Image (cartoon, coloured by chain):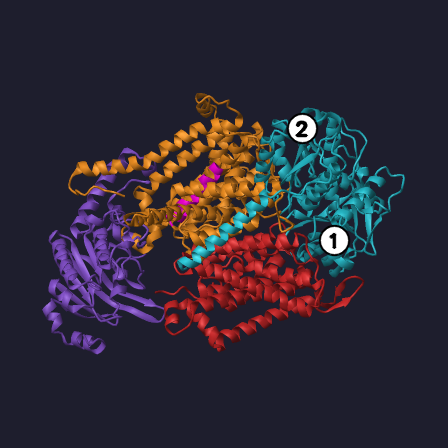
């Protein structure tokens, strides 16, 4: 079975996609935990990071492009937070979800208006400058070819995971953000500004998304329509990991990426995209609280 | 939300809408030469937004350019040309409504477009019933087969590209092929045609895979193809999918020659695929290798002229899709020139067109053939040193 | 007289926490029974078990001769159980009278087709439902608010509406979870007289409350629960003088 | 709602019921008049728009019943729309290839068997899955050896009875579901082969088949998925929708895939409805007739919707939304009603799908018309029109269509602003409108506008005594 020897390669590529799903899932989780809102525009943050980086890289060094991309993401996140905040107090969750859907549609439209629909190549972080373009380095491991950029993706993911864990566990703001969702009234009583926390959560989620986007753009290219699919898969990961559960979302994201890649490579590539959703449905029906979530609280 | 913020919000929203409306009412700058006769109105429906904008945008740009050119030259027989543009965003439902709008306008004499096979098929029946000439820029052979009197198309059918590919493969002794396609309309159509064409021939399709337009990695599919060890890999899709395929293939160290479809006949593919683009062979309209084709080729002058004009207007090279729109628009223009604004006459005139030298090829329409092209409209191209060269 | 509701060695655990611990409990037909206990004694949990909303971990619950173990929650209602909730659960998306009309669900039969196509059965039944709903609303003094949104009622009236809604189902037993909490003295008095009237009509009533005063005045029999176990049972007088009860109340709540 | 206040008078309550219905009937009368007269004043262009509005209204009503009334969010509703459209289209023009029929028939049979099994035993999850597997095995086994149909029925029933007995689900119920599976399998295979032979069924039977199929899928899916709540339910329905769209795209042998979609779908005719047009003195073109057909369905849906929400079952739906626990405590079998409203909703969406597929002058469908974007748009229609408002669905669908048409025109006129050609504005404006409506009128347009009007009215009234009015 020659196919079996492809498994390491499939895992490597699945891992790259999986890391992005994981970061998107983390973004979902941050916003969900502070506001209880499912942010359908999460994938667009990734797109914005990738696009801004790609556009700026053409003219400036990455020293300008990368911070600018993350900043642009944060800014868009803050604006979106504003839209969500206006009606937050009295609005049904569905209203907020629709606002994020609207924002996602509008963001894609604006991006398309500004940058057009064509995919833009982005040079890898550590590549070999070639003739007119930068070629990525690559390594061989167990029969799999690993590109340097993929290591970057994994490294950035790891960094985000560690950063987030420290942030939520050890900083006051992190704990305050967690308090907001559990008990907004209580949070207000002890002097936490819920509004500020909501804005902060959107800014953080957007910044992370943008970071993910710019990291992955050398592998995937930057495209204005890249956000929707990544957003939905990331959402799958967040749910599989148990909504609101960070480590669950990250693990689920990576597993999802790998399973998808394996199914696509070994079984049916035609239905590769359905895999994530089939798993999702199956898991939801067997364990409605998610793959790694805690049992629903029995109040 | 306090009443004040709400007021501010409403005021802001209203002013944006008002600004849009006002700007719409503002007079457009008049053209250079303004012929005085009543304008000929032509409808144009392209996918200017959405996933297929890379196809639709150059089409629209081409038509806009031609409209300007013709009017600057004094119009057709003294009549200015006015094009009504619609965007279908690649959605059949939107195309139907755009078409309906155009049909409702009594002045419209013909419709150019749409970009995609799906949207063209969606409005073909409607145009036929309303006796409105439709010149589609989409590829699917089903648009003109069976022939509906009022429906034409200017893009080559995929089957012509496949004939060229098969010829090249035969010449290079390729017996087994791993096929991979984008699962969008373009890619699935190619797959269907490929399978139909090679069925029962000595060229065997040993692996059949697909990917999604928004997919970002095709290693899994290619790994599966590698397992079957074909003589060559053929990828059917539009950017950026094929570029990713080329890159993944290179990284998997697969040595097989890589064939592609005419969907990659633009510079973007080379930019995206970088060194992986090297050696890729694909059928393409002659537009991209215009300067390399022999001077005896009847199309050469037209191709160079279009390339220069487009480059001047938009500071970028044209592509095949823009070429389809050029052909469609010019066919209508010529017919208008000949018979004036009469839909039935235009239809008949287009159908009579012989030896029309276009961008896509040399068209010879007949009541049985509403595409009018042969496989000679394609030529095989190889990417060498980041440049297009004629493949042997 | 046979027990209408019988809980046999009922236990319910949430994770490691045992909220109700092998409780035997019964309500006789026509009785006004009270279930009291300090906060966190497991009263509401026991009530949820009796009405089938929470499944039992072990033990069995028999209503009017048939067990509801393993049956869906609505099954208890079809056996003649109706209840109100500690923190009122009205259908806030409906009007006052529509809330009560839902209460008539268990004794009406018309299906979706009948309602959609307005068959004769629909008309006939709808009339009965409206009559019954008005009767129940009149009984709790909400006639005038029939058309108002349920959510717009003041709290006291919401409680009354919940009772009317429960009664509209013609229950054999009415279970009330802390009906007097949040009510003014006047409203509590009205509630007492309403409950007496309900019992006089032959409906069995089970009251759950931690307010001794209110309960002692009107109930025939009282069961006291503490930390998931029954600690006393008897007439109000017997219970009031029970040492264990006094200890439980004094120990946990200086009431 | 004004209900008379004398509780004991039978007469009064009878009148009350009648009066309520009379009040709700008034808009329908206006509707019918407008319905009949519209083609006198509308050209093909407007009629096309109205046909889309009508189809979208039906979808919005179906989703509103599910989401606005019963409180069950669905982000995959376009799937049922698509199932209706595809079933209809496939049966009429793209008969299923012969080699797929045995498998497809078996699939449908097993699905039907599962539906019977789960409704009889309330089995779910793994138990249902193993029952399904058993049925598939029995069906394949008996078909592989070419048994007489009667033998197939017998074996299937007996086999399932044995399985159910082993799984402690009741032999009788297992037998019944096995029998159903076998009967439906044979029937479907026979019917599909018949359709193939005749080269296509009529659009009307296509529509009926679509409703049956969508209903079956909704029943099976709903029974499992509707146990979930909130975001999980939203995610599960979204997942279902995405999967269905992928199947439309990829199962080329049956659905035609995404290259050319399905074209040349015959028009659904209803000559007698065209008669309405003739009465008002209009020349009845196929499009006019189709307009009458679509809006006749819209009328029926509006009426069913309005009637249902104001009936015993409708109140049960709304009670599920209000509080499931309270509803259960009153004897409402919430899981049953949730499935019921889901199936009803899927059925209406499926009818809308058939109408979409058989549209006069178009007759074309493509997978892209049934994806997540469409599902999201349906949710938007419902919310813009107003949750829990049947007539709001009409308003929501109309509003969205008007915005779309306006945007379509924007492209034509090539507006410029600050020297930029404004093209491809649709998504931007569409997104902005969504956000705007949600912020300014989260209750939807019906409530939003009426509240604003009421506020304005109060303002002028208050102003009047001062003499400023």
Q: Earlier in the sequence, mark 2 or mark 1?
A: 2
Q: CA distance from mark 2 to mark 1?
A: 35 Å
Q: Chain of mark 2?
A: B
Chain A colour?
red
Can you say whether C24 is above or below D64 in the image?
below
Q: Quick check: D147 above or below C243?
A: above
Which colour denotes chain B? cyan
Which residue lies at the image location 14% right of the left edge and 68% below the top edge? C213
The image shows residue D112 at horizontal and vertical percentages of 45, 42
Chain drawn purple in the picture: C
Q: Quadrant of residue A228?
A: bottom right
Q: Nearer the viewer, residue B160 or B121?
A: B121
- Image position, residue C156 (x, y; %): 21, 59
Residue A214 position within the rendered picture, expressed as x and y whole percent measured from the top left: 64, 64
Residue B280: image location, x then y, percent: 79, 52
Q: How many marks?
A: 2
Residue B113: image quadrant is top right
Q: Which chain is orange?
A: D
Q: Nearer the viewer, mark 2 or mark 1?
A: 2
Find disc 1 in the rendering and name its residue: B269
Q: Main secondary structure of the magenta part?
A: helix
Q: Based on the displayed image, in which of its 4 quarters is residue A189 positioned?
A: bottom left
C30 left or right, relative to C112: left
The stretch drawn in magenta includes residue D60: yes
Question: Which residue is the site of mark 2?
Answer: B150
Left or right of residue D232, residue B366 in this image: right
The quadrant in which the N terminus of chain A is found is bottom right
Q: Nearer the viewer, residue C1 or C162?
A: C162
Q: Which residues are magenta?
A: D53-70
Chain of the residue displaying label 1: B
Residue B1 within the segment the image draws in magenta: no
């Amino acid at each position: 079975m020659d196919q079996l020897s492809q498994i390491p390669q499939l895992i490597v590529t699945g891992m790259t996609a999986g890391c992005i799903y994981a970061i998107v899932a983390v973004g979902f989780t941050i916003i969900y935990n502070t506001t209880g809102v499912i942010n359908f525009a999460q994938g667009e943050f990734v797109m914005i990071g990738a696009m801004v980086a790609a556009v700026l890289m053409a003219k400036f060094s990455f020293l300008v492009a990368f911070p600018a991309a993350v900043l642009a993401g944060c800014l868009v996140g803050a604006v979106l937070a504003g839209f969500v905040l206006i009606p937050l107090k009295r609005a049904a969750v569905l209203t907020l979800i629709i606002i994020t859907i609207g924002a996602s549609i509008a963001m894609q439209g604006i991006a398309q208006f500004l940058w057009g629909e064509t995919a833009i190549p982005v040079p890898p972080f550590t590549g070999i400058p070639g003739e007119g373009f930068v070629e990525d380095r690559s390594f061989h491991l167990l029969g799999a070819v690993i590109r340097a950029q993929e290591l970057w993706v994994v490294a950035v993911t790891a960094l985000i995971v560690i950063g987030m864990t420290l942030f939520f566990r050890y900083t006051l703001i992190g704990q305050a953000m967690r308090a907001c969702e559990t008990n907004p009234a209580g949070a207000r009583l002890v002097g936490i500004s819920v509004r500020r926390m909501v804005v902060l959560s959107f800014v953080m989620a957007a910044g992370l998304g943008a970071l993910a986007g710019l990291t992955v753009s050398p592998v995937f290219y930057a495209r204005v329509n890249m956000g929707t699919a990544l957003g939905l898969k990331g959402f799958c990961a967040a749910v599989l990991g148990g909504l609101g559960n960070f480590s669950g979302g990250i693990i689920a994201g990576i597993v999802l990426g790998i399973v998808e890649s394996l199914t696509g490579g070994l079984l049916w590539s035609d239905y590769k995209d359905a895999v994530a959703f089939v798993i999702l449905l199956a898991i939801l029906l067997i364990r409605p609280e998610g793959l790694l979530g805690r049992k629903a609280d029995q109040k | 939300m306090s009443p004040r913020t709400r007021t501010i919000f409403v005021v802001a929203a209203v002013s944006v809408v008002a600004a849009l409306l006002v700007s719409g009412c503002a007079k457009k700058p008049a053209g250079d030469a303004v012929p005085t006769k009543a304008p000929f109105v032509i409808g144009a429906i392209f996918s200017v937004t959405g996933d297929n904008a890379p196809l639709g945008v150059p089409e629209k740009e081409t038509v806009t350019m031609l409209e300007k050119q013709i009017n600057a030259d004094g119009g057709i027989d003294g009549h200015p040309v006015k094009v009504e543009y619609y965007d279908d965003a690649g959605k059949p439902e939107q195309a139907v409504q755009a078409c309906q709008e155009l049909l409702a306008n009594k002045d419209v004499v013909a419709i150019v477009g749409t970009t995609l096979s799906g949207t063209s098929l969606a409005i073909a029946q409607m145009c036929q019933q309303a006796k409105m000439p439709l010149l589609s820029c989409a590829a699917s052979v089903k648009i003109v087969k069976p022939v509906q009197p009022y429906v034409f198309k200017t893009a080559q059918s995929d089957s012509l590209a496949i004939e060229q590919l098969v010829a090249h493969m035969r010449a290079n002794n390729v017996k087994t092929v791993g096929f991979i396609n984008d699962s969008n309309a373009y890619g699935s159509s190619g797959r269907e045609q490929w399978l139909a064409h090679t069925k029962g021939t000595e060229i065997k399709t040993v692996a059949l895979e697909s990917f999604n337009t928004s997919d970002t990695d095709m290693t899994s599919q290619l790994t599966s193809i590698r397992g079957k060890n074909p003589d060559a890999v053929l990828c059917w899709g539009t950017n950026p999918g094929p570029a990713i395929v080329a890159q993944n293939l290179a990284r998997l160290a697969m040595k097989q020659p890589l064939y592609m479809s005419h969907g990659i006949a633009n510079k973007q593919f080379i930019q995206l695929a970088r060194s992986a683009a090297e050696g890729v062979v694909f059928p393409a309209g002659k537009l991209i290798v215009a300067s390399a084709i022999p001077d005896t080729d009847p199309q050469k002058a037209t191709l160079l002229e279009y390339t220069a004009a487009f480059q001047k207007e938009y500071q970028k090279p044209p592509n095949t899709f823009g070429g389809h729109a050029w052909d469609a628009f010019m066919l209508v223009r010529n017919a208008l020139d000949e018979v004036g604004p009469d839909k039935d006459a235009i239809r008949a005139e287009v159908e009579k067109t012989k030896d029309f030298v276009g961008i896509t090829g040399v068209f010879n329409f007949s009541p049985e053939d509403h595409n009018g092209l042969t496989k000679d409209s394609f030529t095989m191209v190889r990417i060498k040193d980041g440049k297009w060269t004629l493949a042997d | 007289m046979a027990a209408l509701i019988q809980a046999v060695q009922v236990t319910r655990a949430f994770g490691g926490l045992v909220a109700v611990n092998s409780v035997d409990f019964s309500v006789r037909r026509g009785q006004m029974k009270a279930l009291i206990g300090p906060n966190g004694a497991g009263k509401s949990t026991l009530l949820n078990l009796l009405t089938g909303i929470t499944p039992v971990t072990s033990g069995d619950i028999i209503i009017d001769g048939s067990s509801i173990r393993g049956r869906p929650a609505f099954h208890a209602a079809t056996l003649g159980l109706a209840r109100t909730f500690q923190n009122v659960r009205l259908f806030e998306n409906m009007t006052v009278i529509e809330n009560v009309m839902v209460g008539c669900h268990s004794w009406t039969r018309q299906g979706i087709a009948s309602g959609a196509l307005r068959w004769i059965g629909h008309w006939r039944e709808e009339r009965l439902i409206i009559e019954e709903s008005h009767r129940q609303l009149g009984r709790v003094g909400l006639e005038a608010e029939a058309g108002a949104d349920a959510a717009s009622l003041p709290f006291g009236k919401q409680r009354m509406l919940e009772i009317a809604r429960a009664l509209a189902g013609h229950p054999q037993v009415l279970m009330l979870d802390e009906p007097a909490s949040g009510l003014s003295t006047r409203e509590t008095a009205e509630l007492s007289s309403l409950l007496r009237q309900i019992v006089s009509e032959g409906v069995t009533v089970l009251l759950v409350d931690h307010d001794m005063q209110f309960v002692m005045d009107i109930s025939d029999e009282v069961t006291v629960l503490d930390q998931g176990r029954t600690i006393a049972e008897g007439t109000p007088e017997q219970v009031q003088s029970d040492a264990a009860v006094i200890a439980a109340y004094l120990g946990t709540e200086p009431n | 709602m004004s209900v008379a206040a004398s509780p004991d008078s039978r007469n009064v309550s009878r009148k009350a019921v009648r009066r309520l219905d009379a009040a709700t009937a008034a808009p329908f009368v206006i509707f019918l008049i407008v319905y009949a007269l519209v083609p006198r004043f509308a050209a093909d262009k407007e009629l096309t728009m109205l046909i889309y509005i009508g189809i979208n209204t039906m979808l919005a009503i179906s989703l509103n019943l599910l989401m606005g009334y019963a409180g069950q969010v669905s982000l995959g509703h376009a799937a049922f729309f698509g199932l209706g459209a595809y079933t209809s289209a496939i049966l009429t023009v793209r008969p299923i290839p012969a080699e797929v029929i045995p498998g497809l028939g078996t699939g449908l049979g097993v699905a039907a068997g599962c539906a019977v099994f789960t409704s009889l035993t309330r089995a779910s999850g793994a138990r249902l899955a193993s029952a399904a597997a058993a049925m598939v095995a029995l069906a394949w086994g008996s078909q592989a050896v070419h048994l007489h149909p009667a033998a197939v029925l017998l074996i299937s029933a007996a086999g399932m009875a044995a399985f159910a007995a082993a799984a402690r689900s009741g032999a009788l119920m297992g037998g019944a579901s096995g029998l159903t599976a076998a009967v439906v399998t044979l029937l479907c295979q026979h019917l599909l082969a018949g359709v193939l032979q005749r080269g296509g069924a009529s659009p009307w039977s296509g529509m009926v088949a679509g409703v049956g199929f969508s209903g079956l899928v909704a029943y099976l899916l709903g029974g499992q998925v509707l146990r979930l709540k909130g975001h999980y339910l939203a995610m599960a329905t979204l997942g279902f929708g995405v999967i269905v769209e992928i199947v439309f795209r990829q199962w080329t042998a049956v659905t035609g895939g995404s290259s050319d979609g399905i074209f040349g779908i015959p028009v659904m005719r209803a000559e007698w409805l065209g008669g309405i047009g003739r009465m008002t003195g209009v020349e009845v073109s196929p499009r006019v007739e189709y307009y009458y057909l679509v809006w006749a369905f819209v009328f029926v849906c509006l009426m069913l919707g309005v009637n249902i929400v104001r009936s015993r079952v409708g109140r049960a739906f709304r009670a599920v939304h209000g509080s499931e626990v309270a509803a259960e405590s009153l004897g409402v079998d919430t899981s049953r009603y949730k499935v019921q409203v889901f199936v009803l909703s899927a059925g209406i969406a499926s009818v809308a799908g058939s109408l979409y597929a058989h549209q006069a002058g178009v007759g074309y469908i493509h997978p892209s018309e049934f994806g997540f974007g469409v599902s999201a748009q349906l949710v938007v229609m419902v919310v813009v029109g107003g949750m829990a408002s049947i007539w709001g669905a009409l308003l929501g669908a109309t509003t969205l269509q008007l915005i779309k048409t306006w945007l379509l025109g924007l492209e034509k006129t090539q507006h410029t602003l600050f020297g930029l050609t404004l093209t491809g504005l649709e998504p931007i404006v569409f997104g902005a409108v969504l956000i705007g409506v949600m912020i300014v009128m989260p209750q939807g347009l019906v409530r939003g506008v009426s509240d604003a009007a009421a506020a304005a009215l109060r303002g002028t009234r208050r102003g009047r005594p001062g003499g400023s009015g």
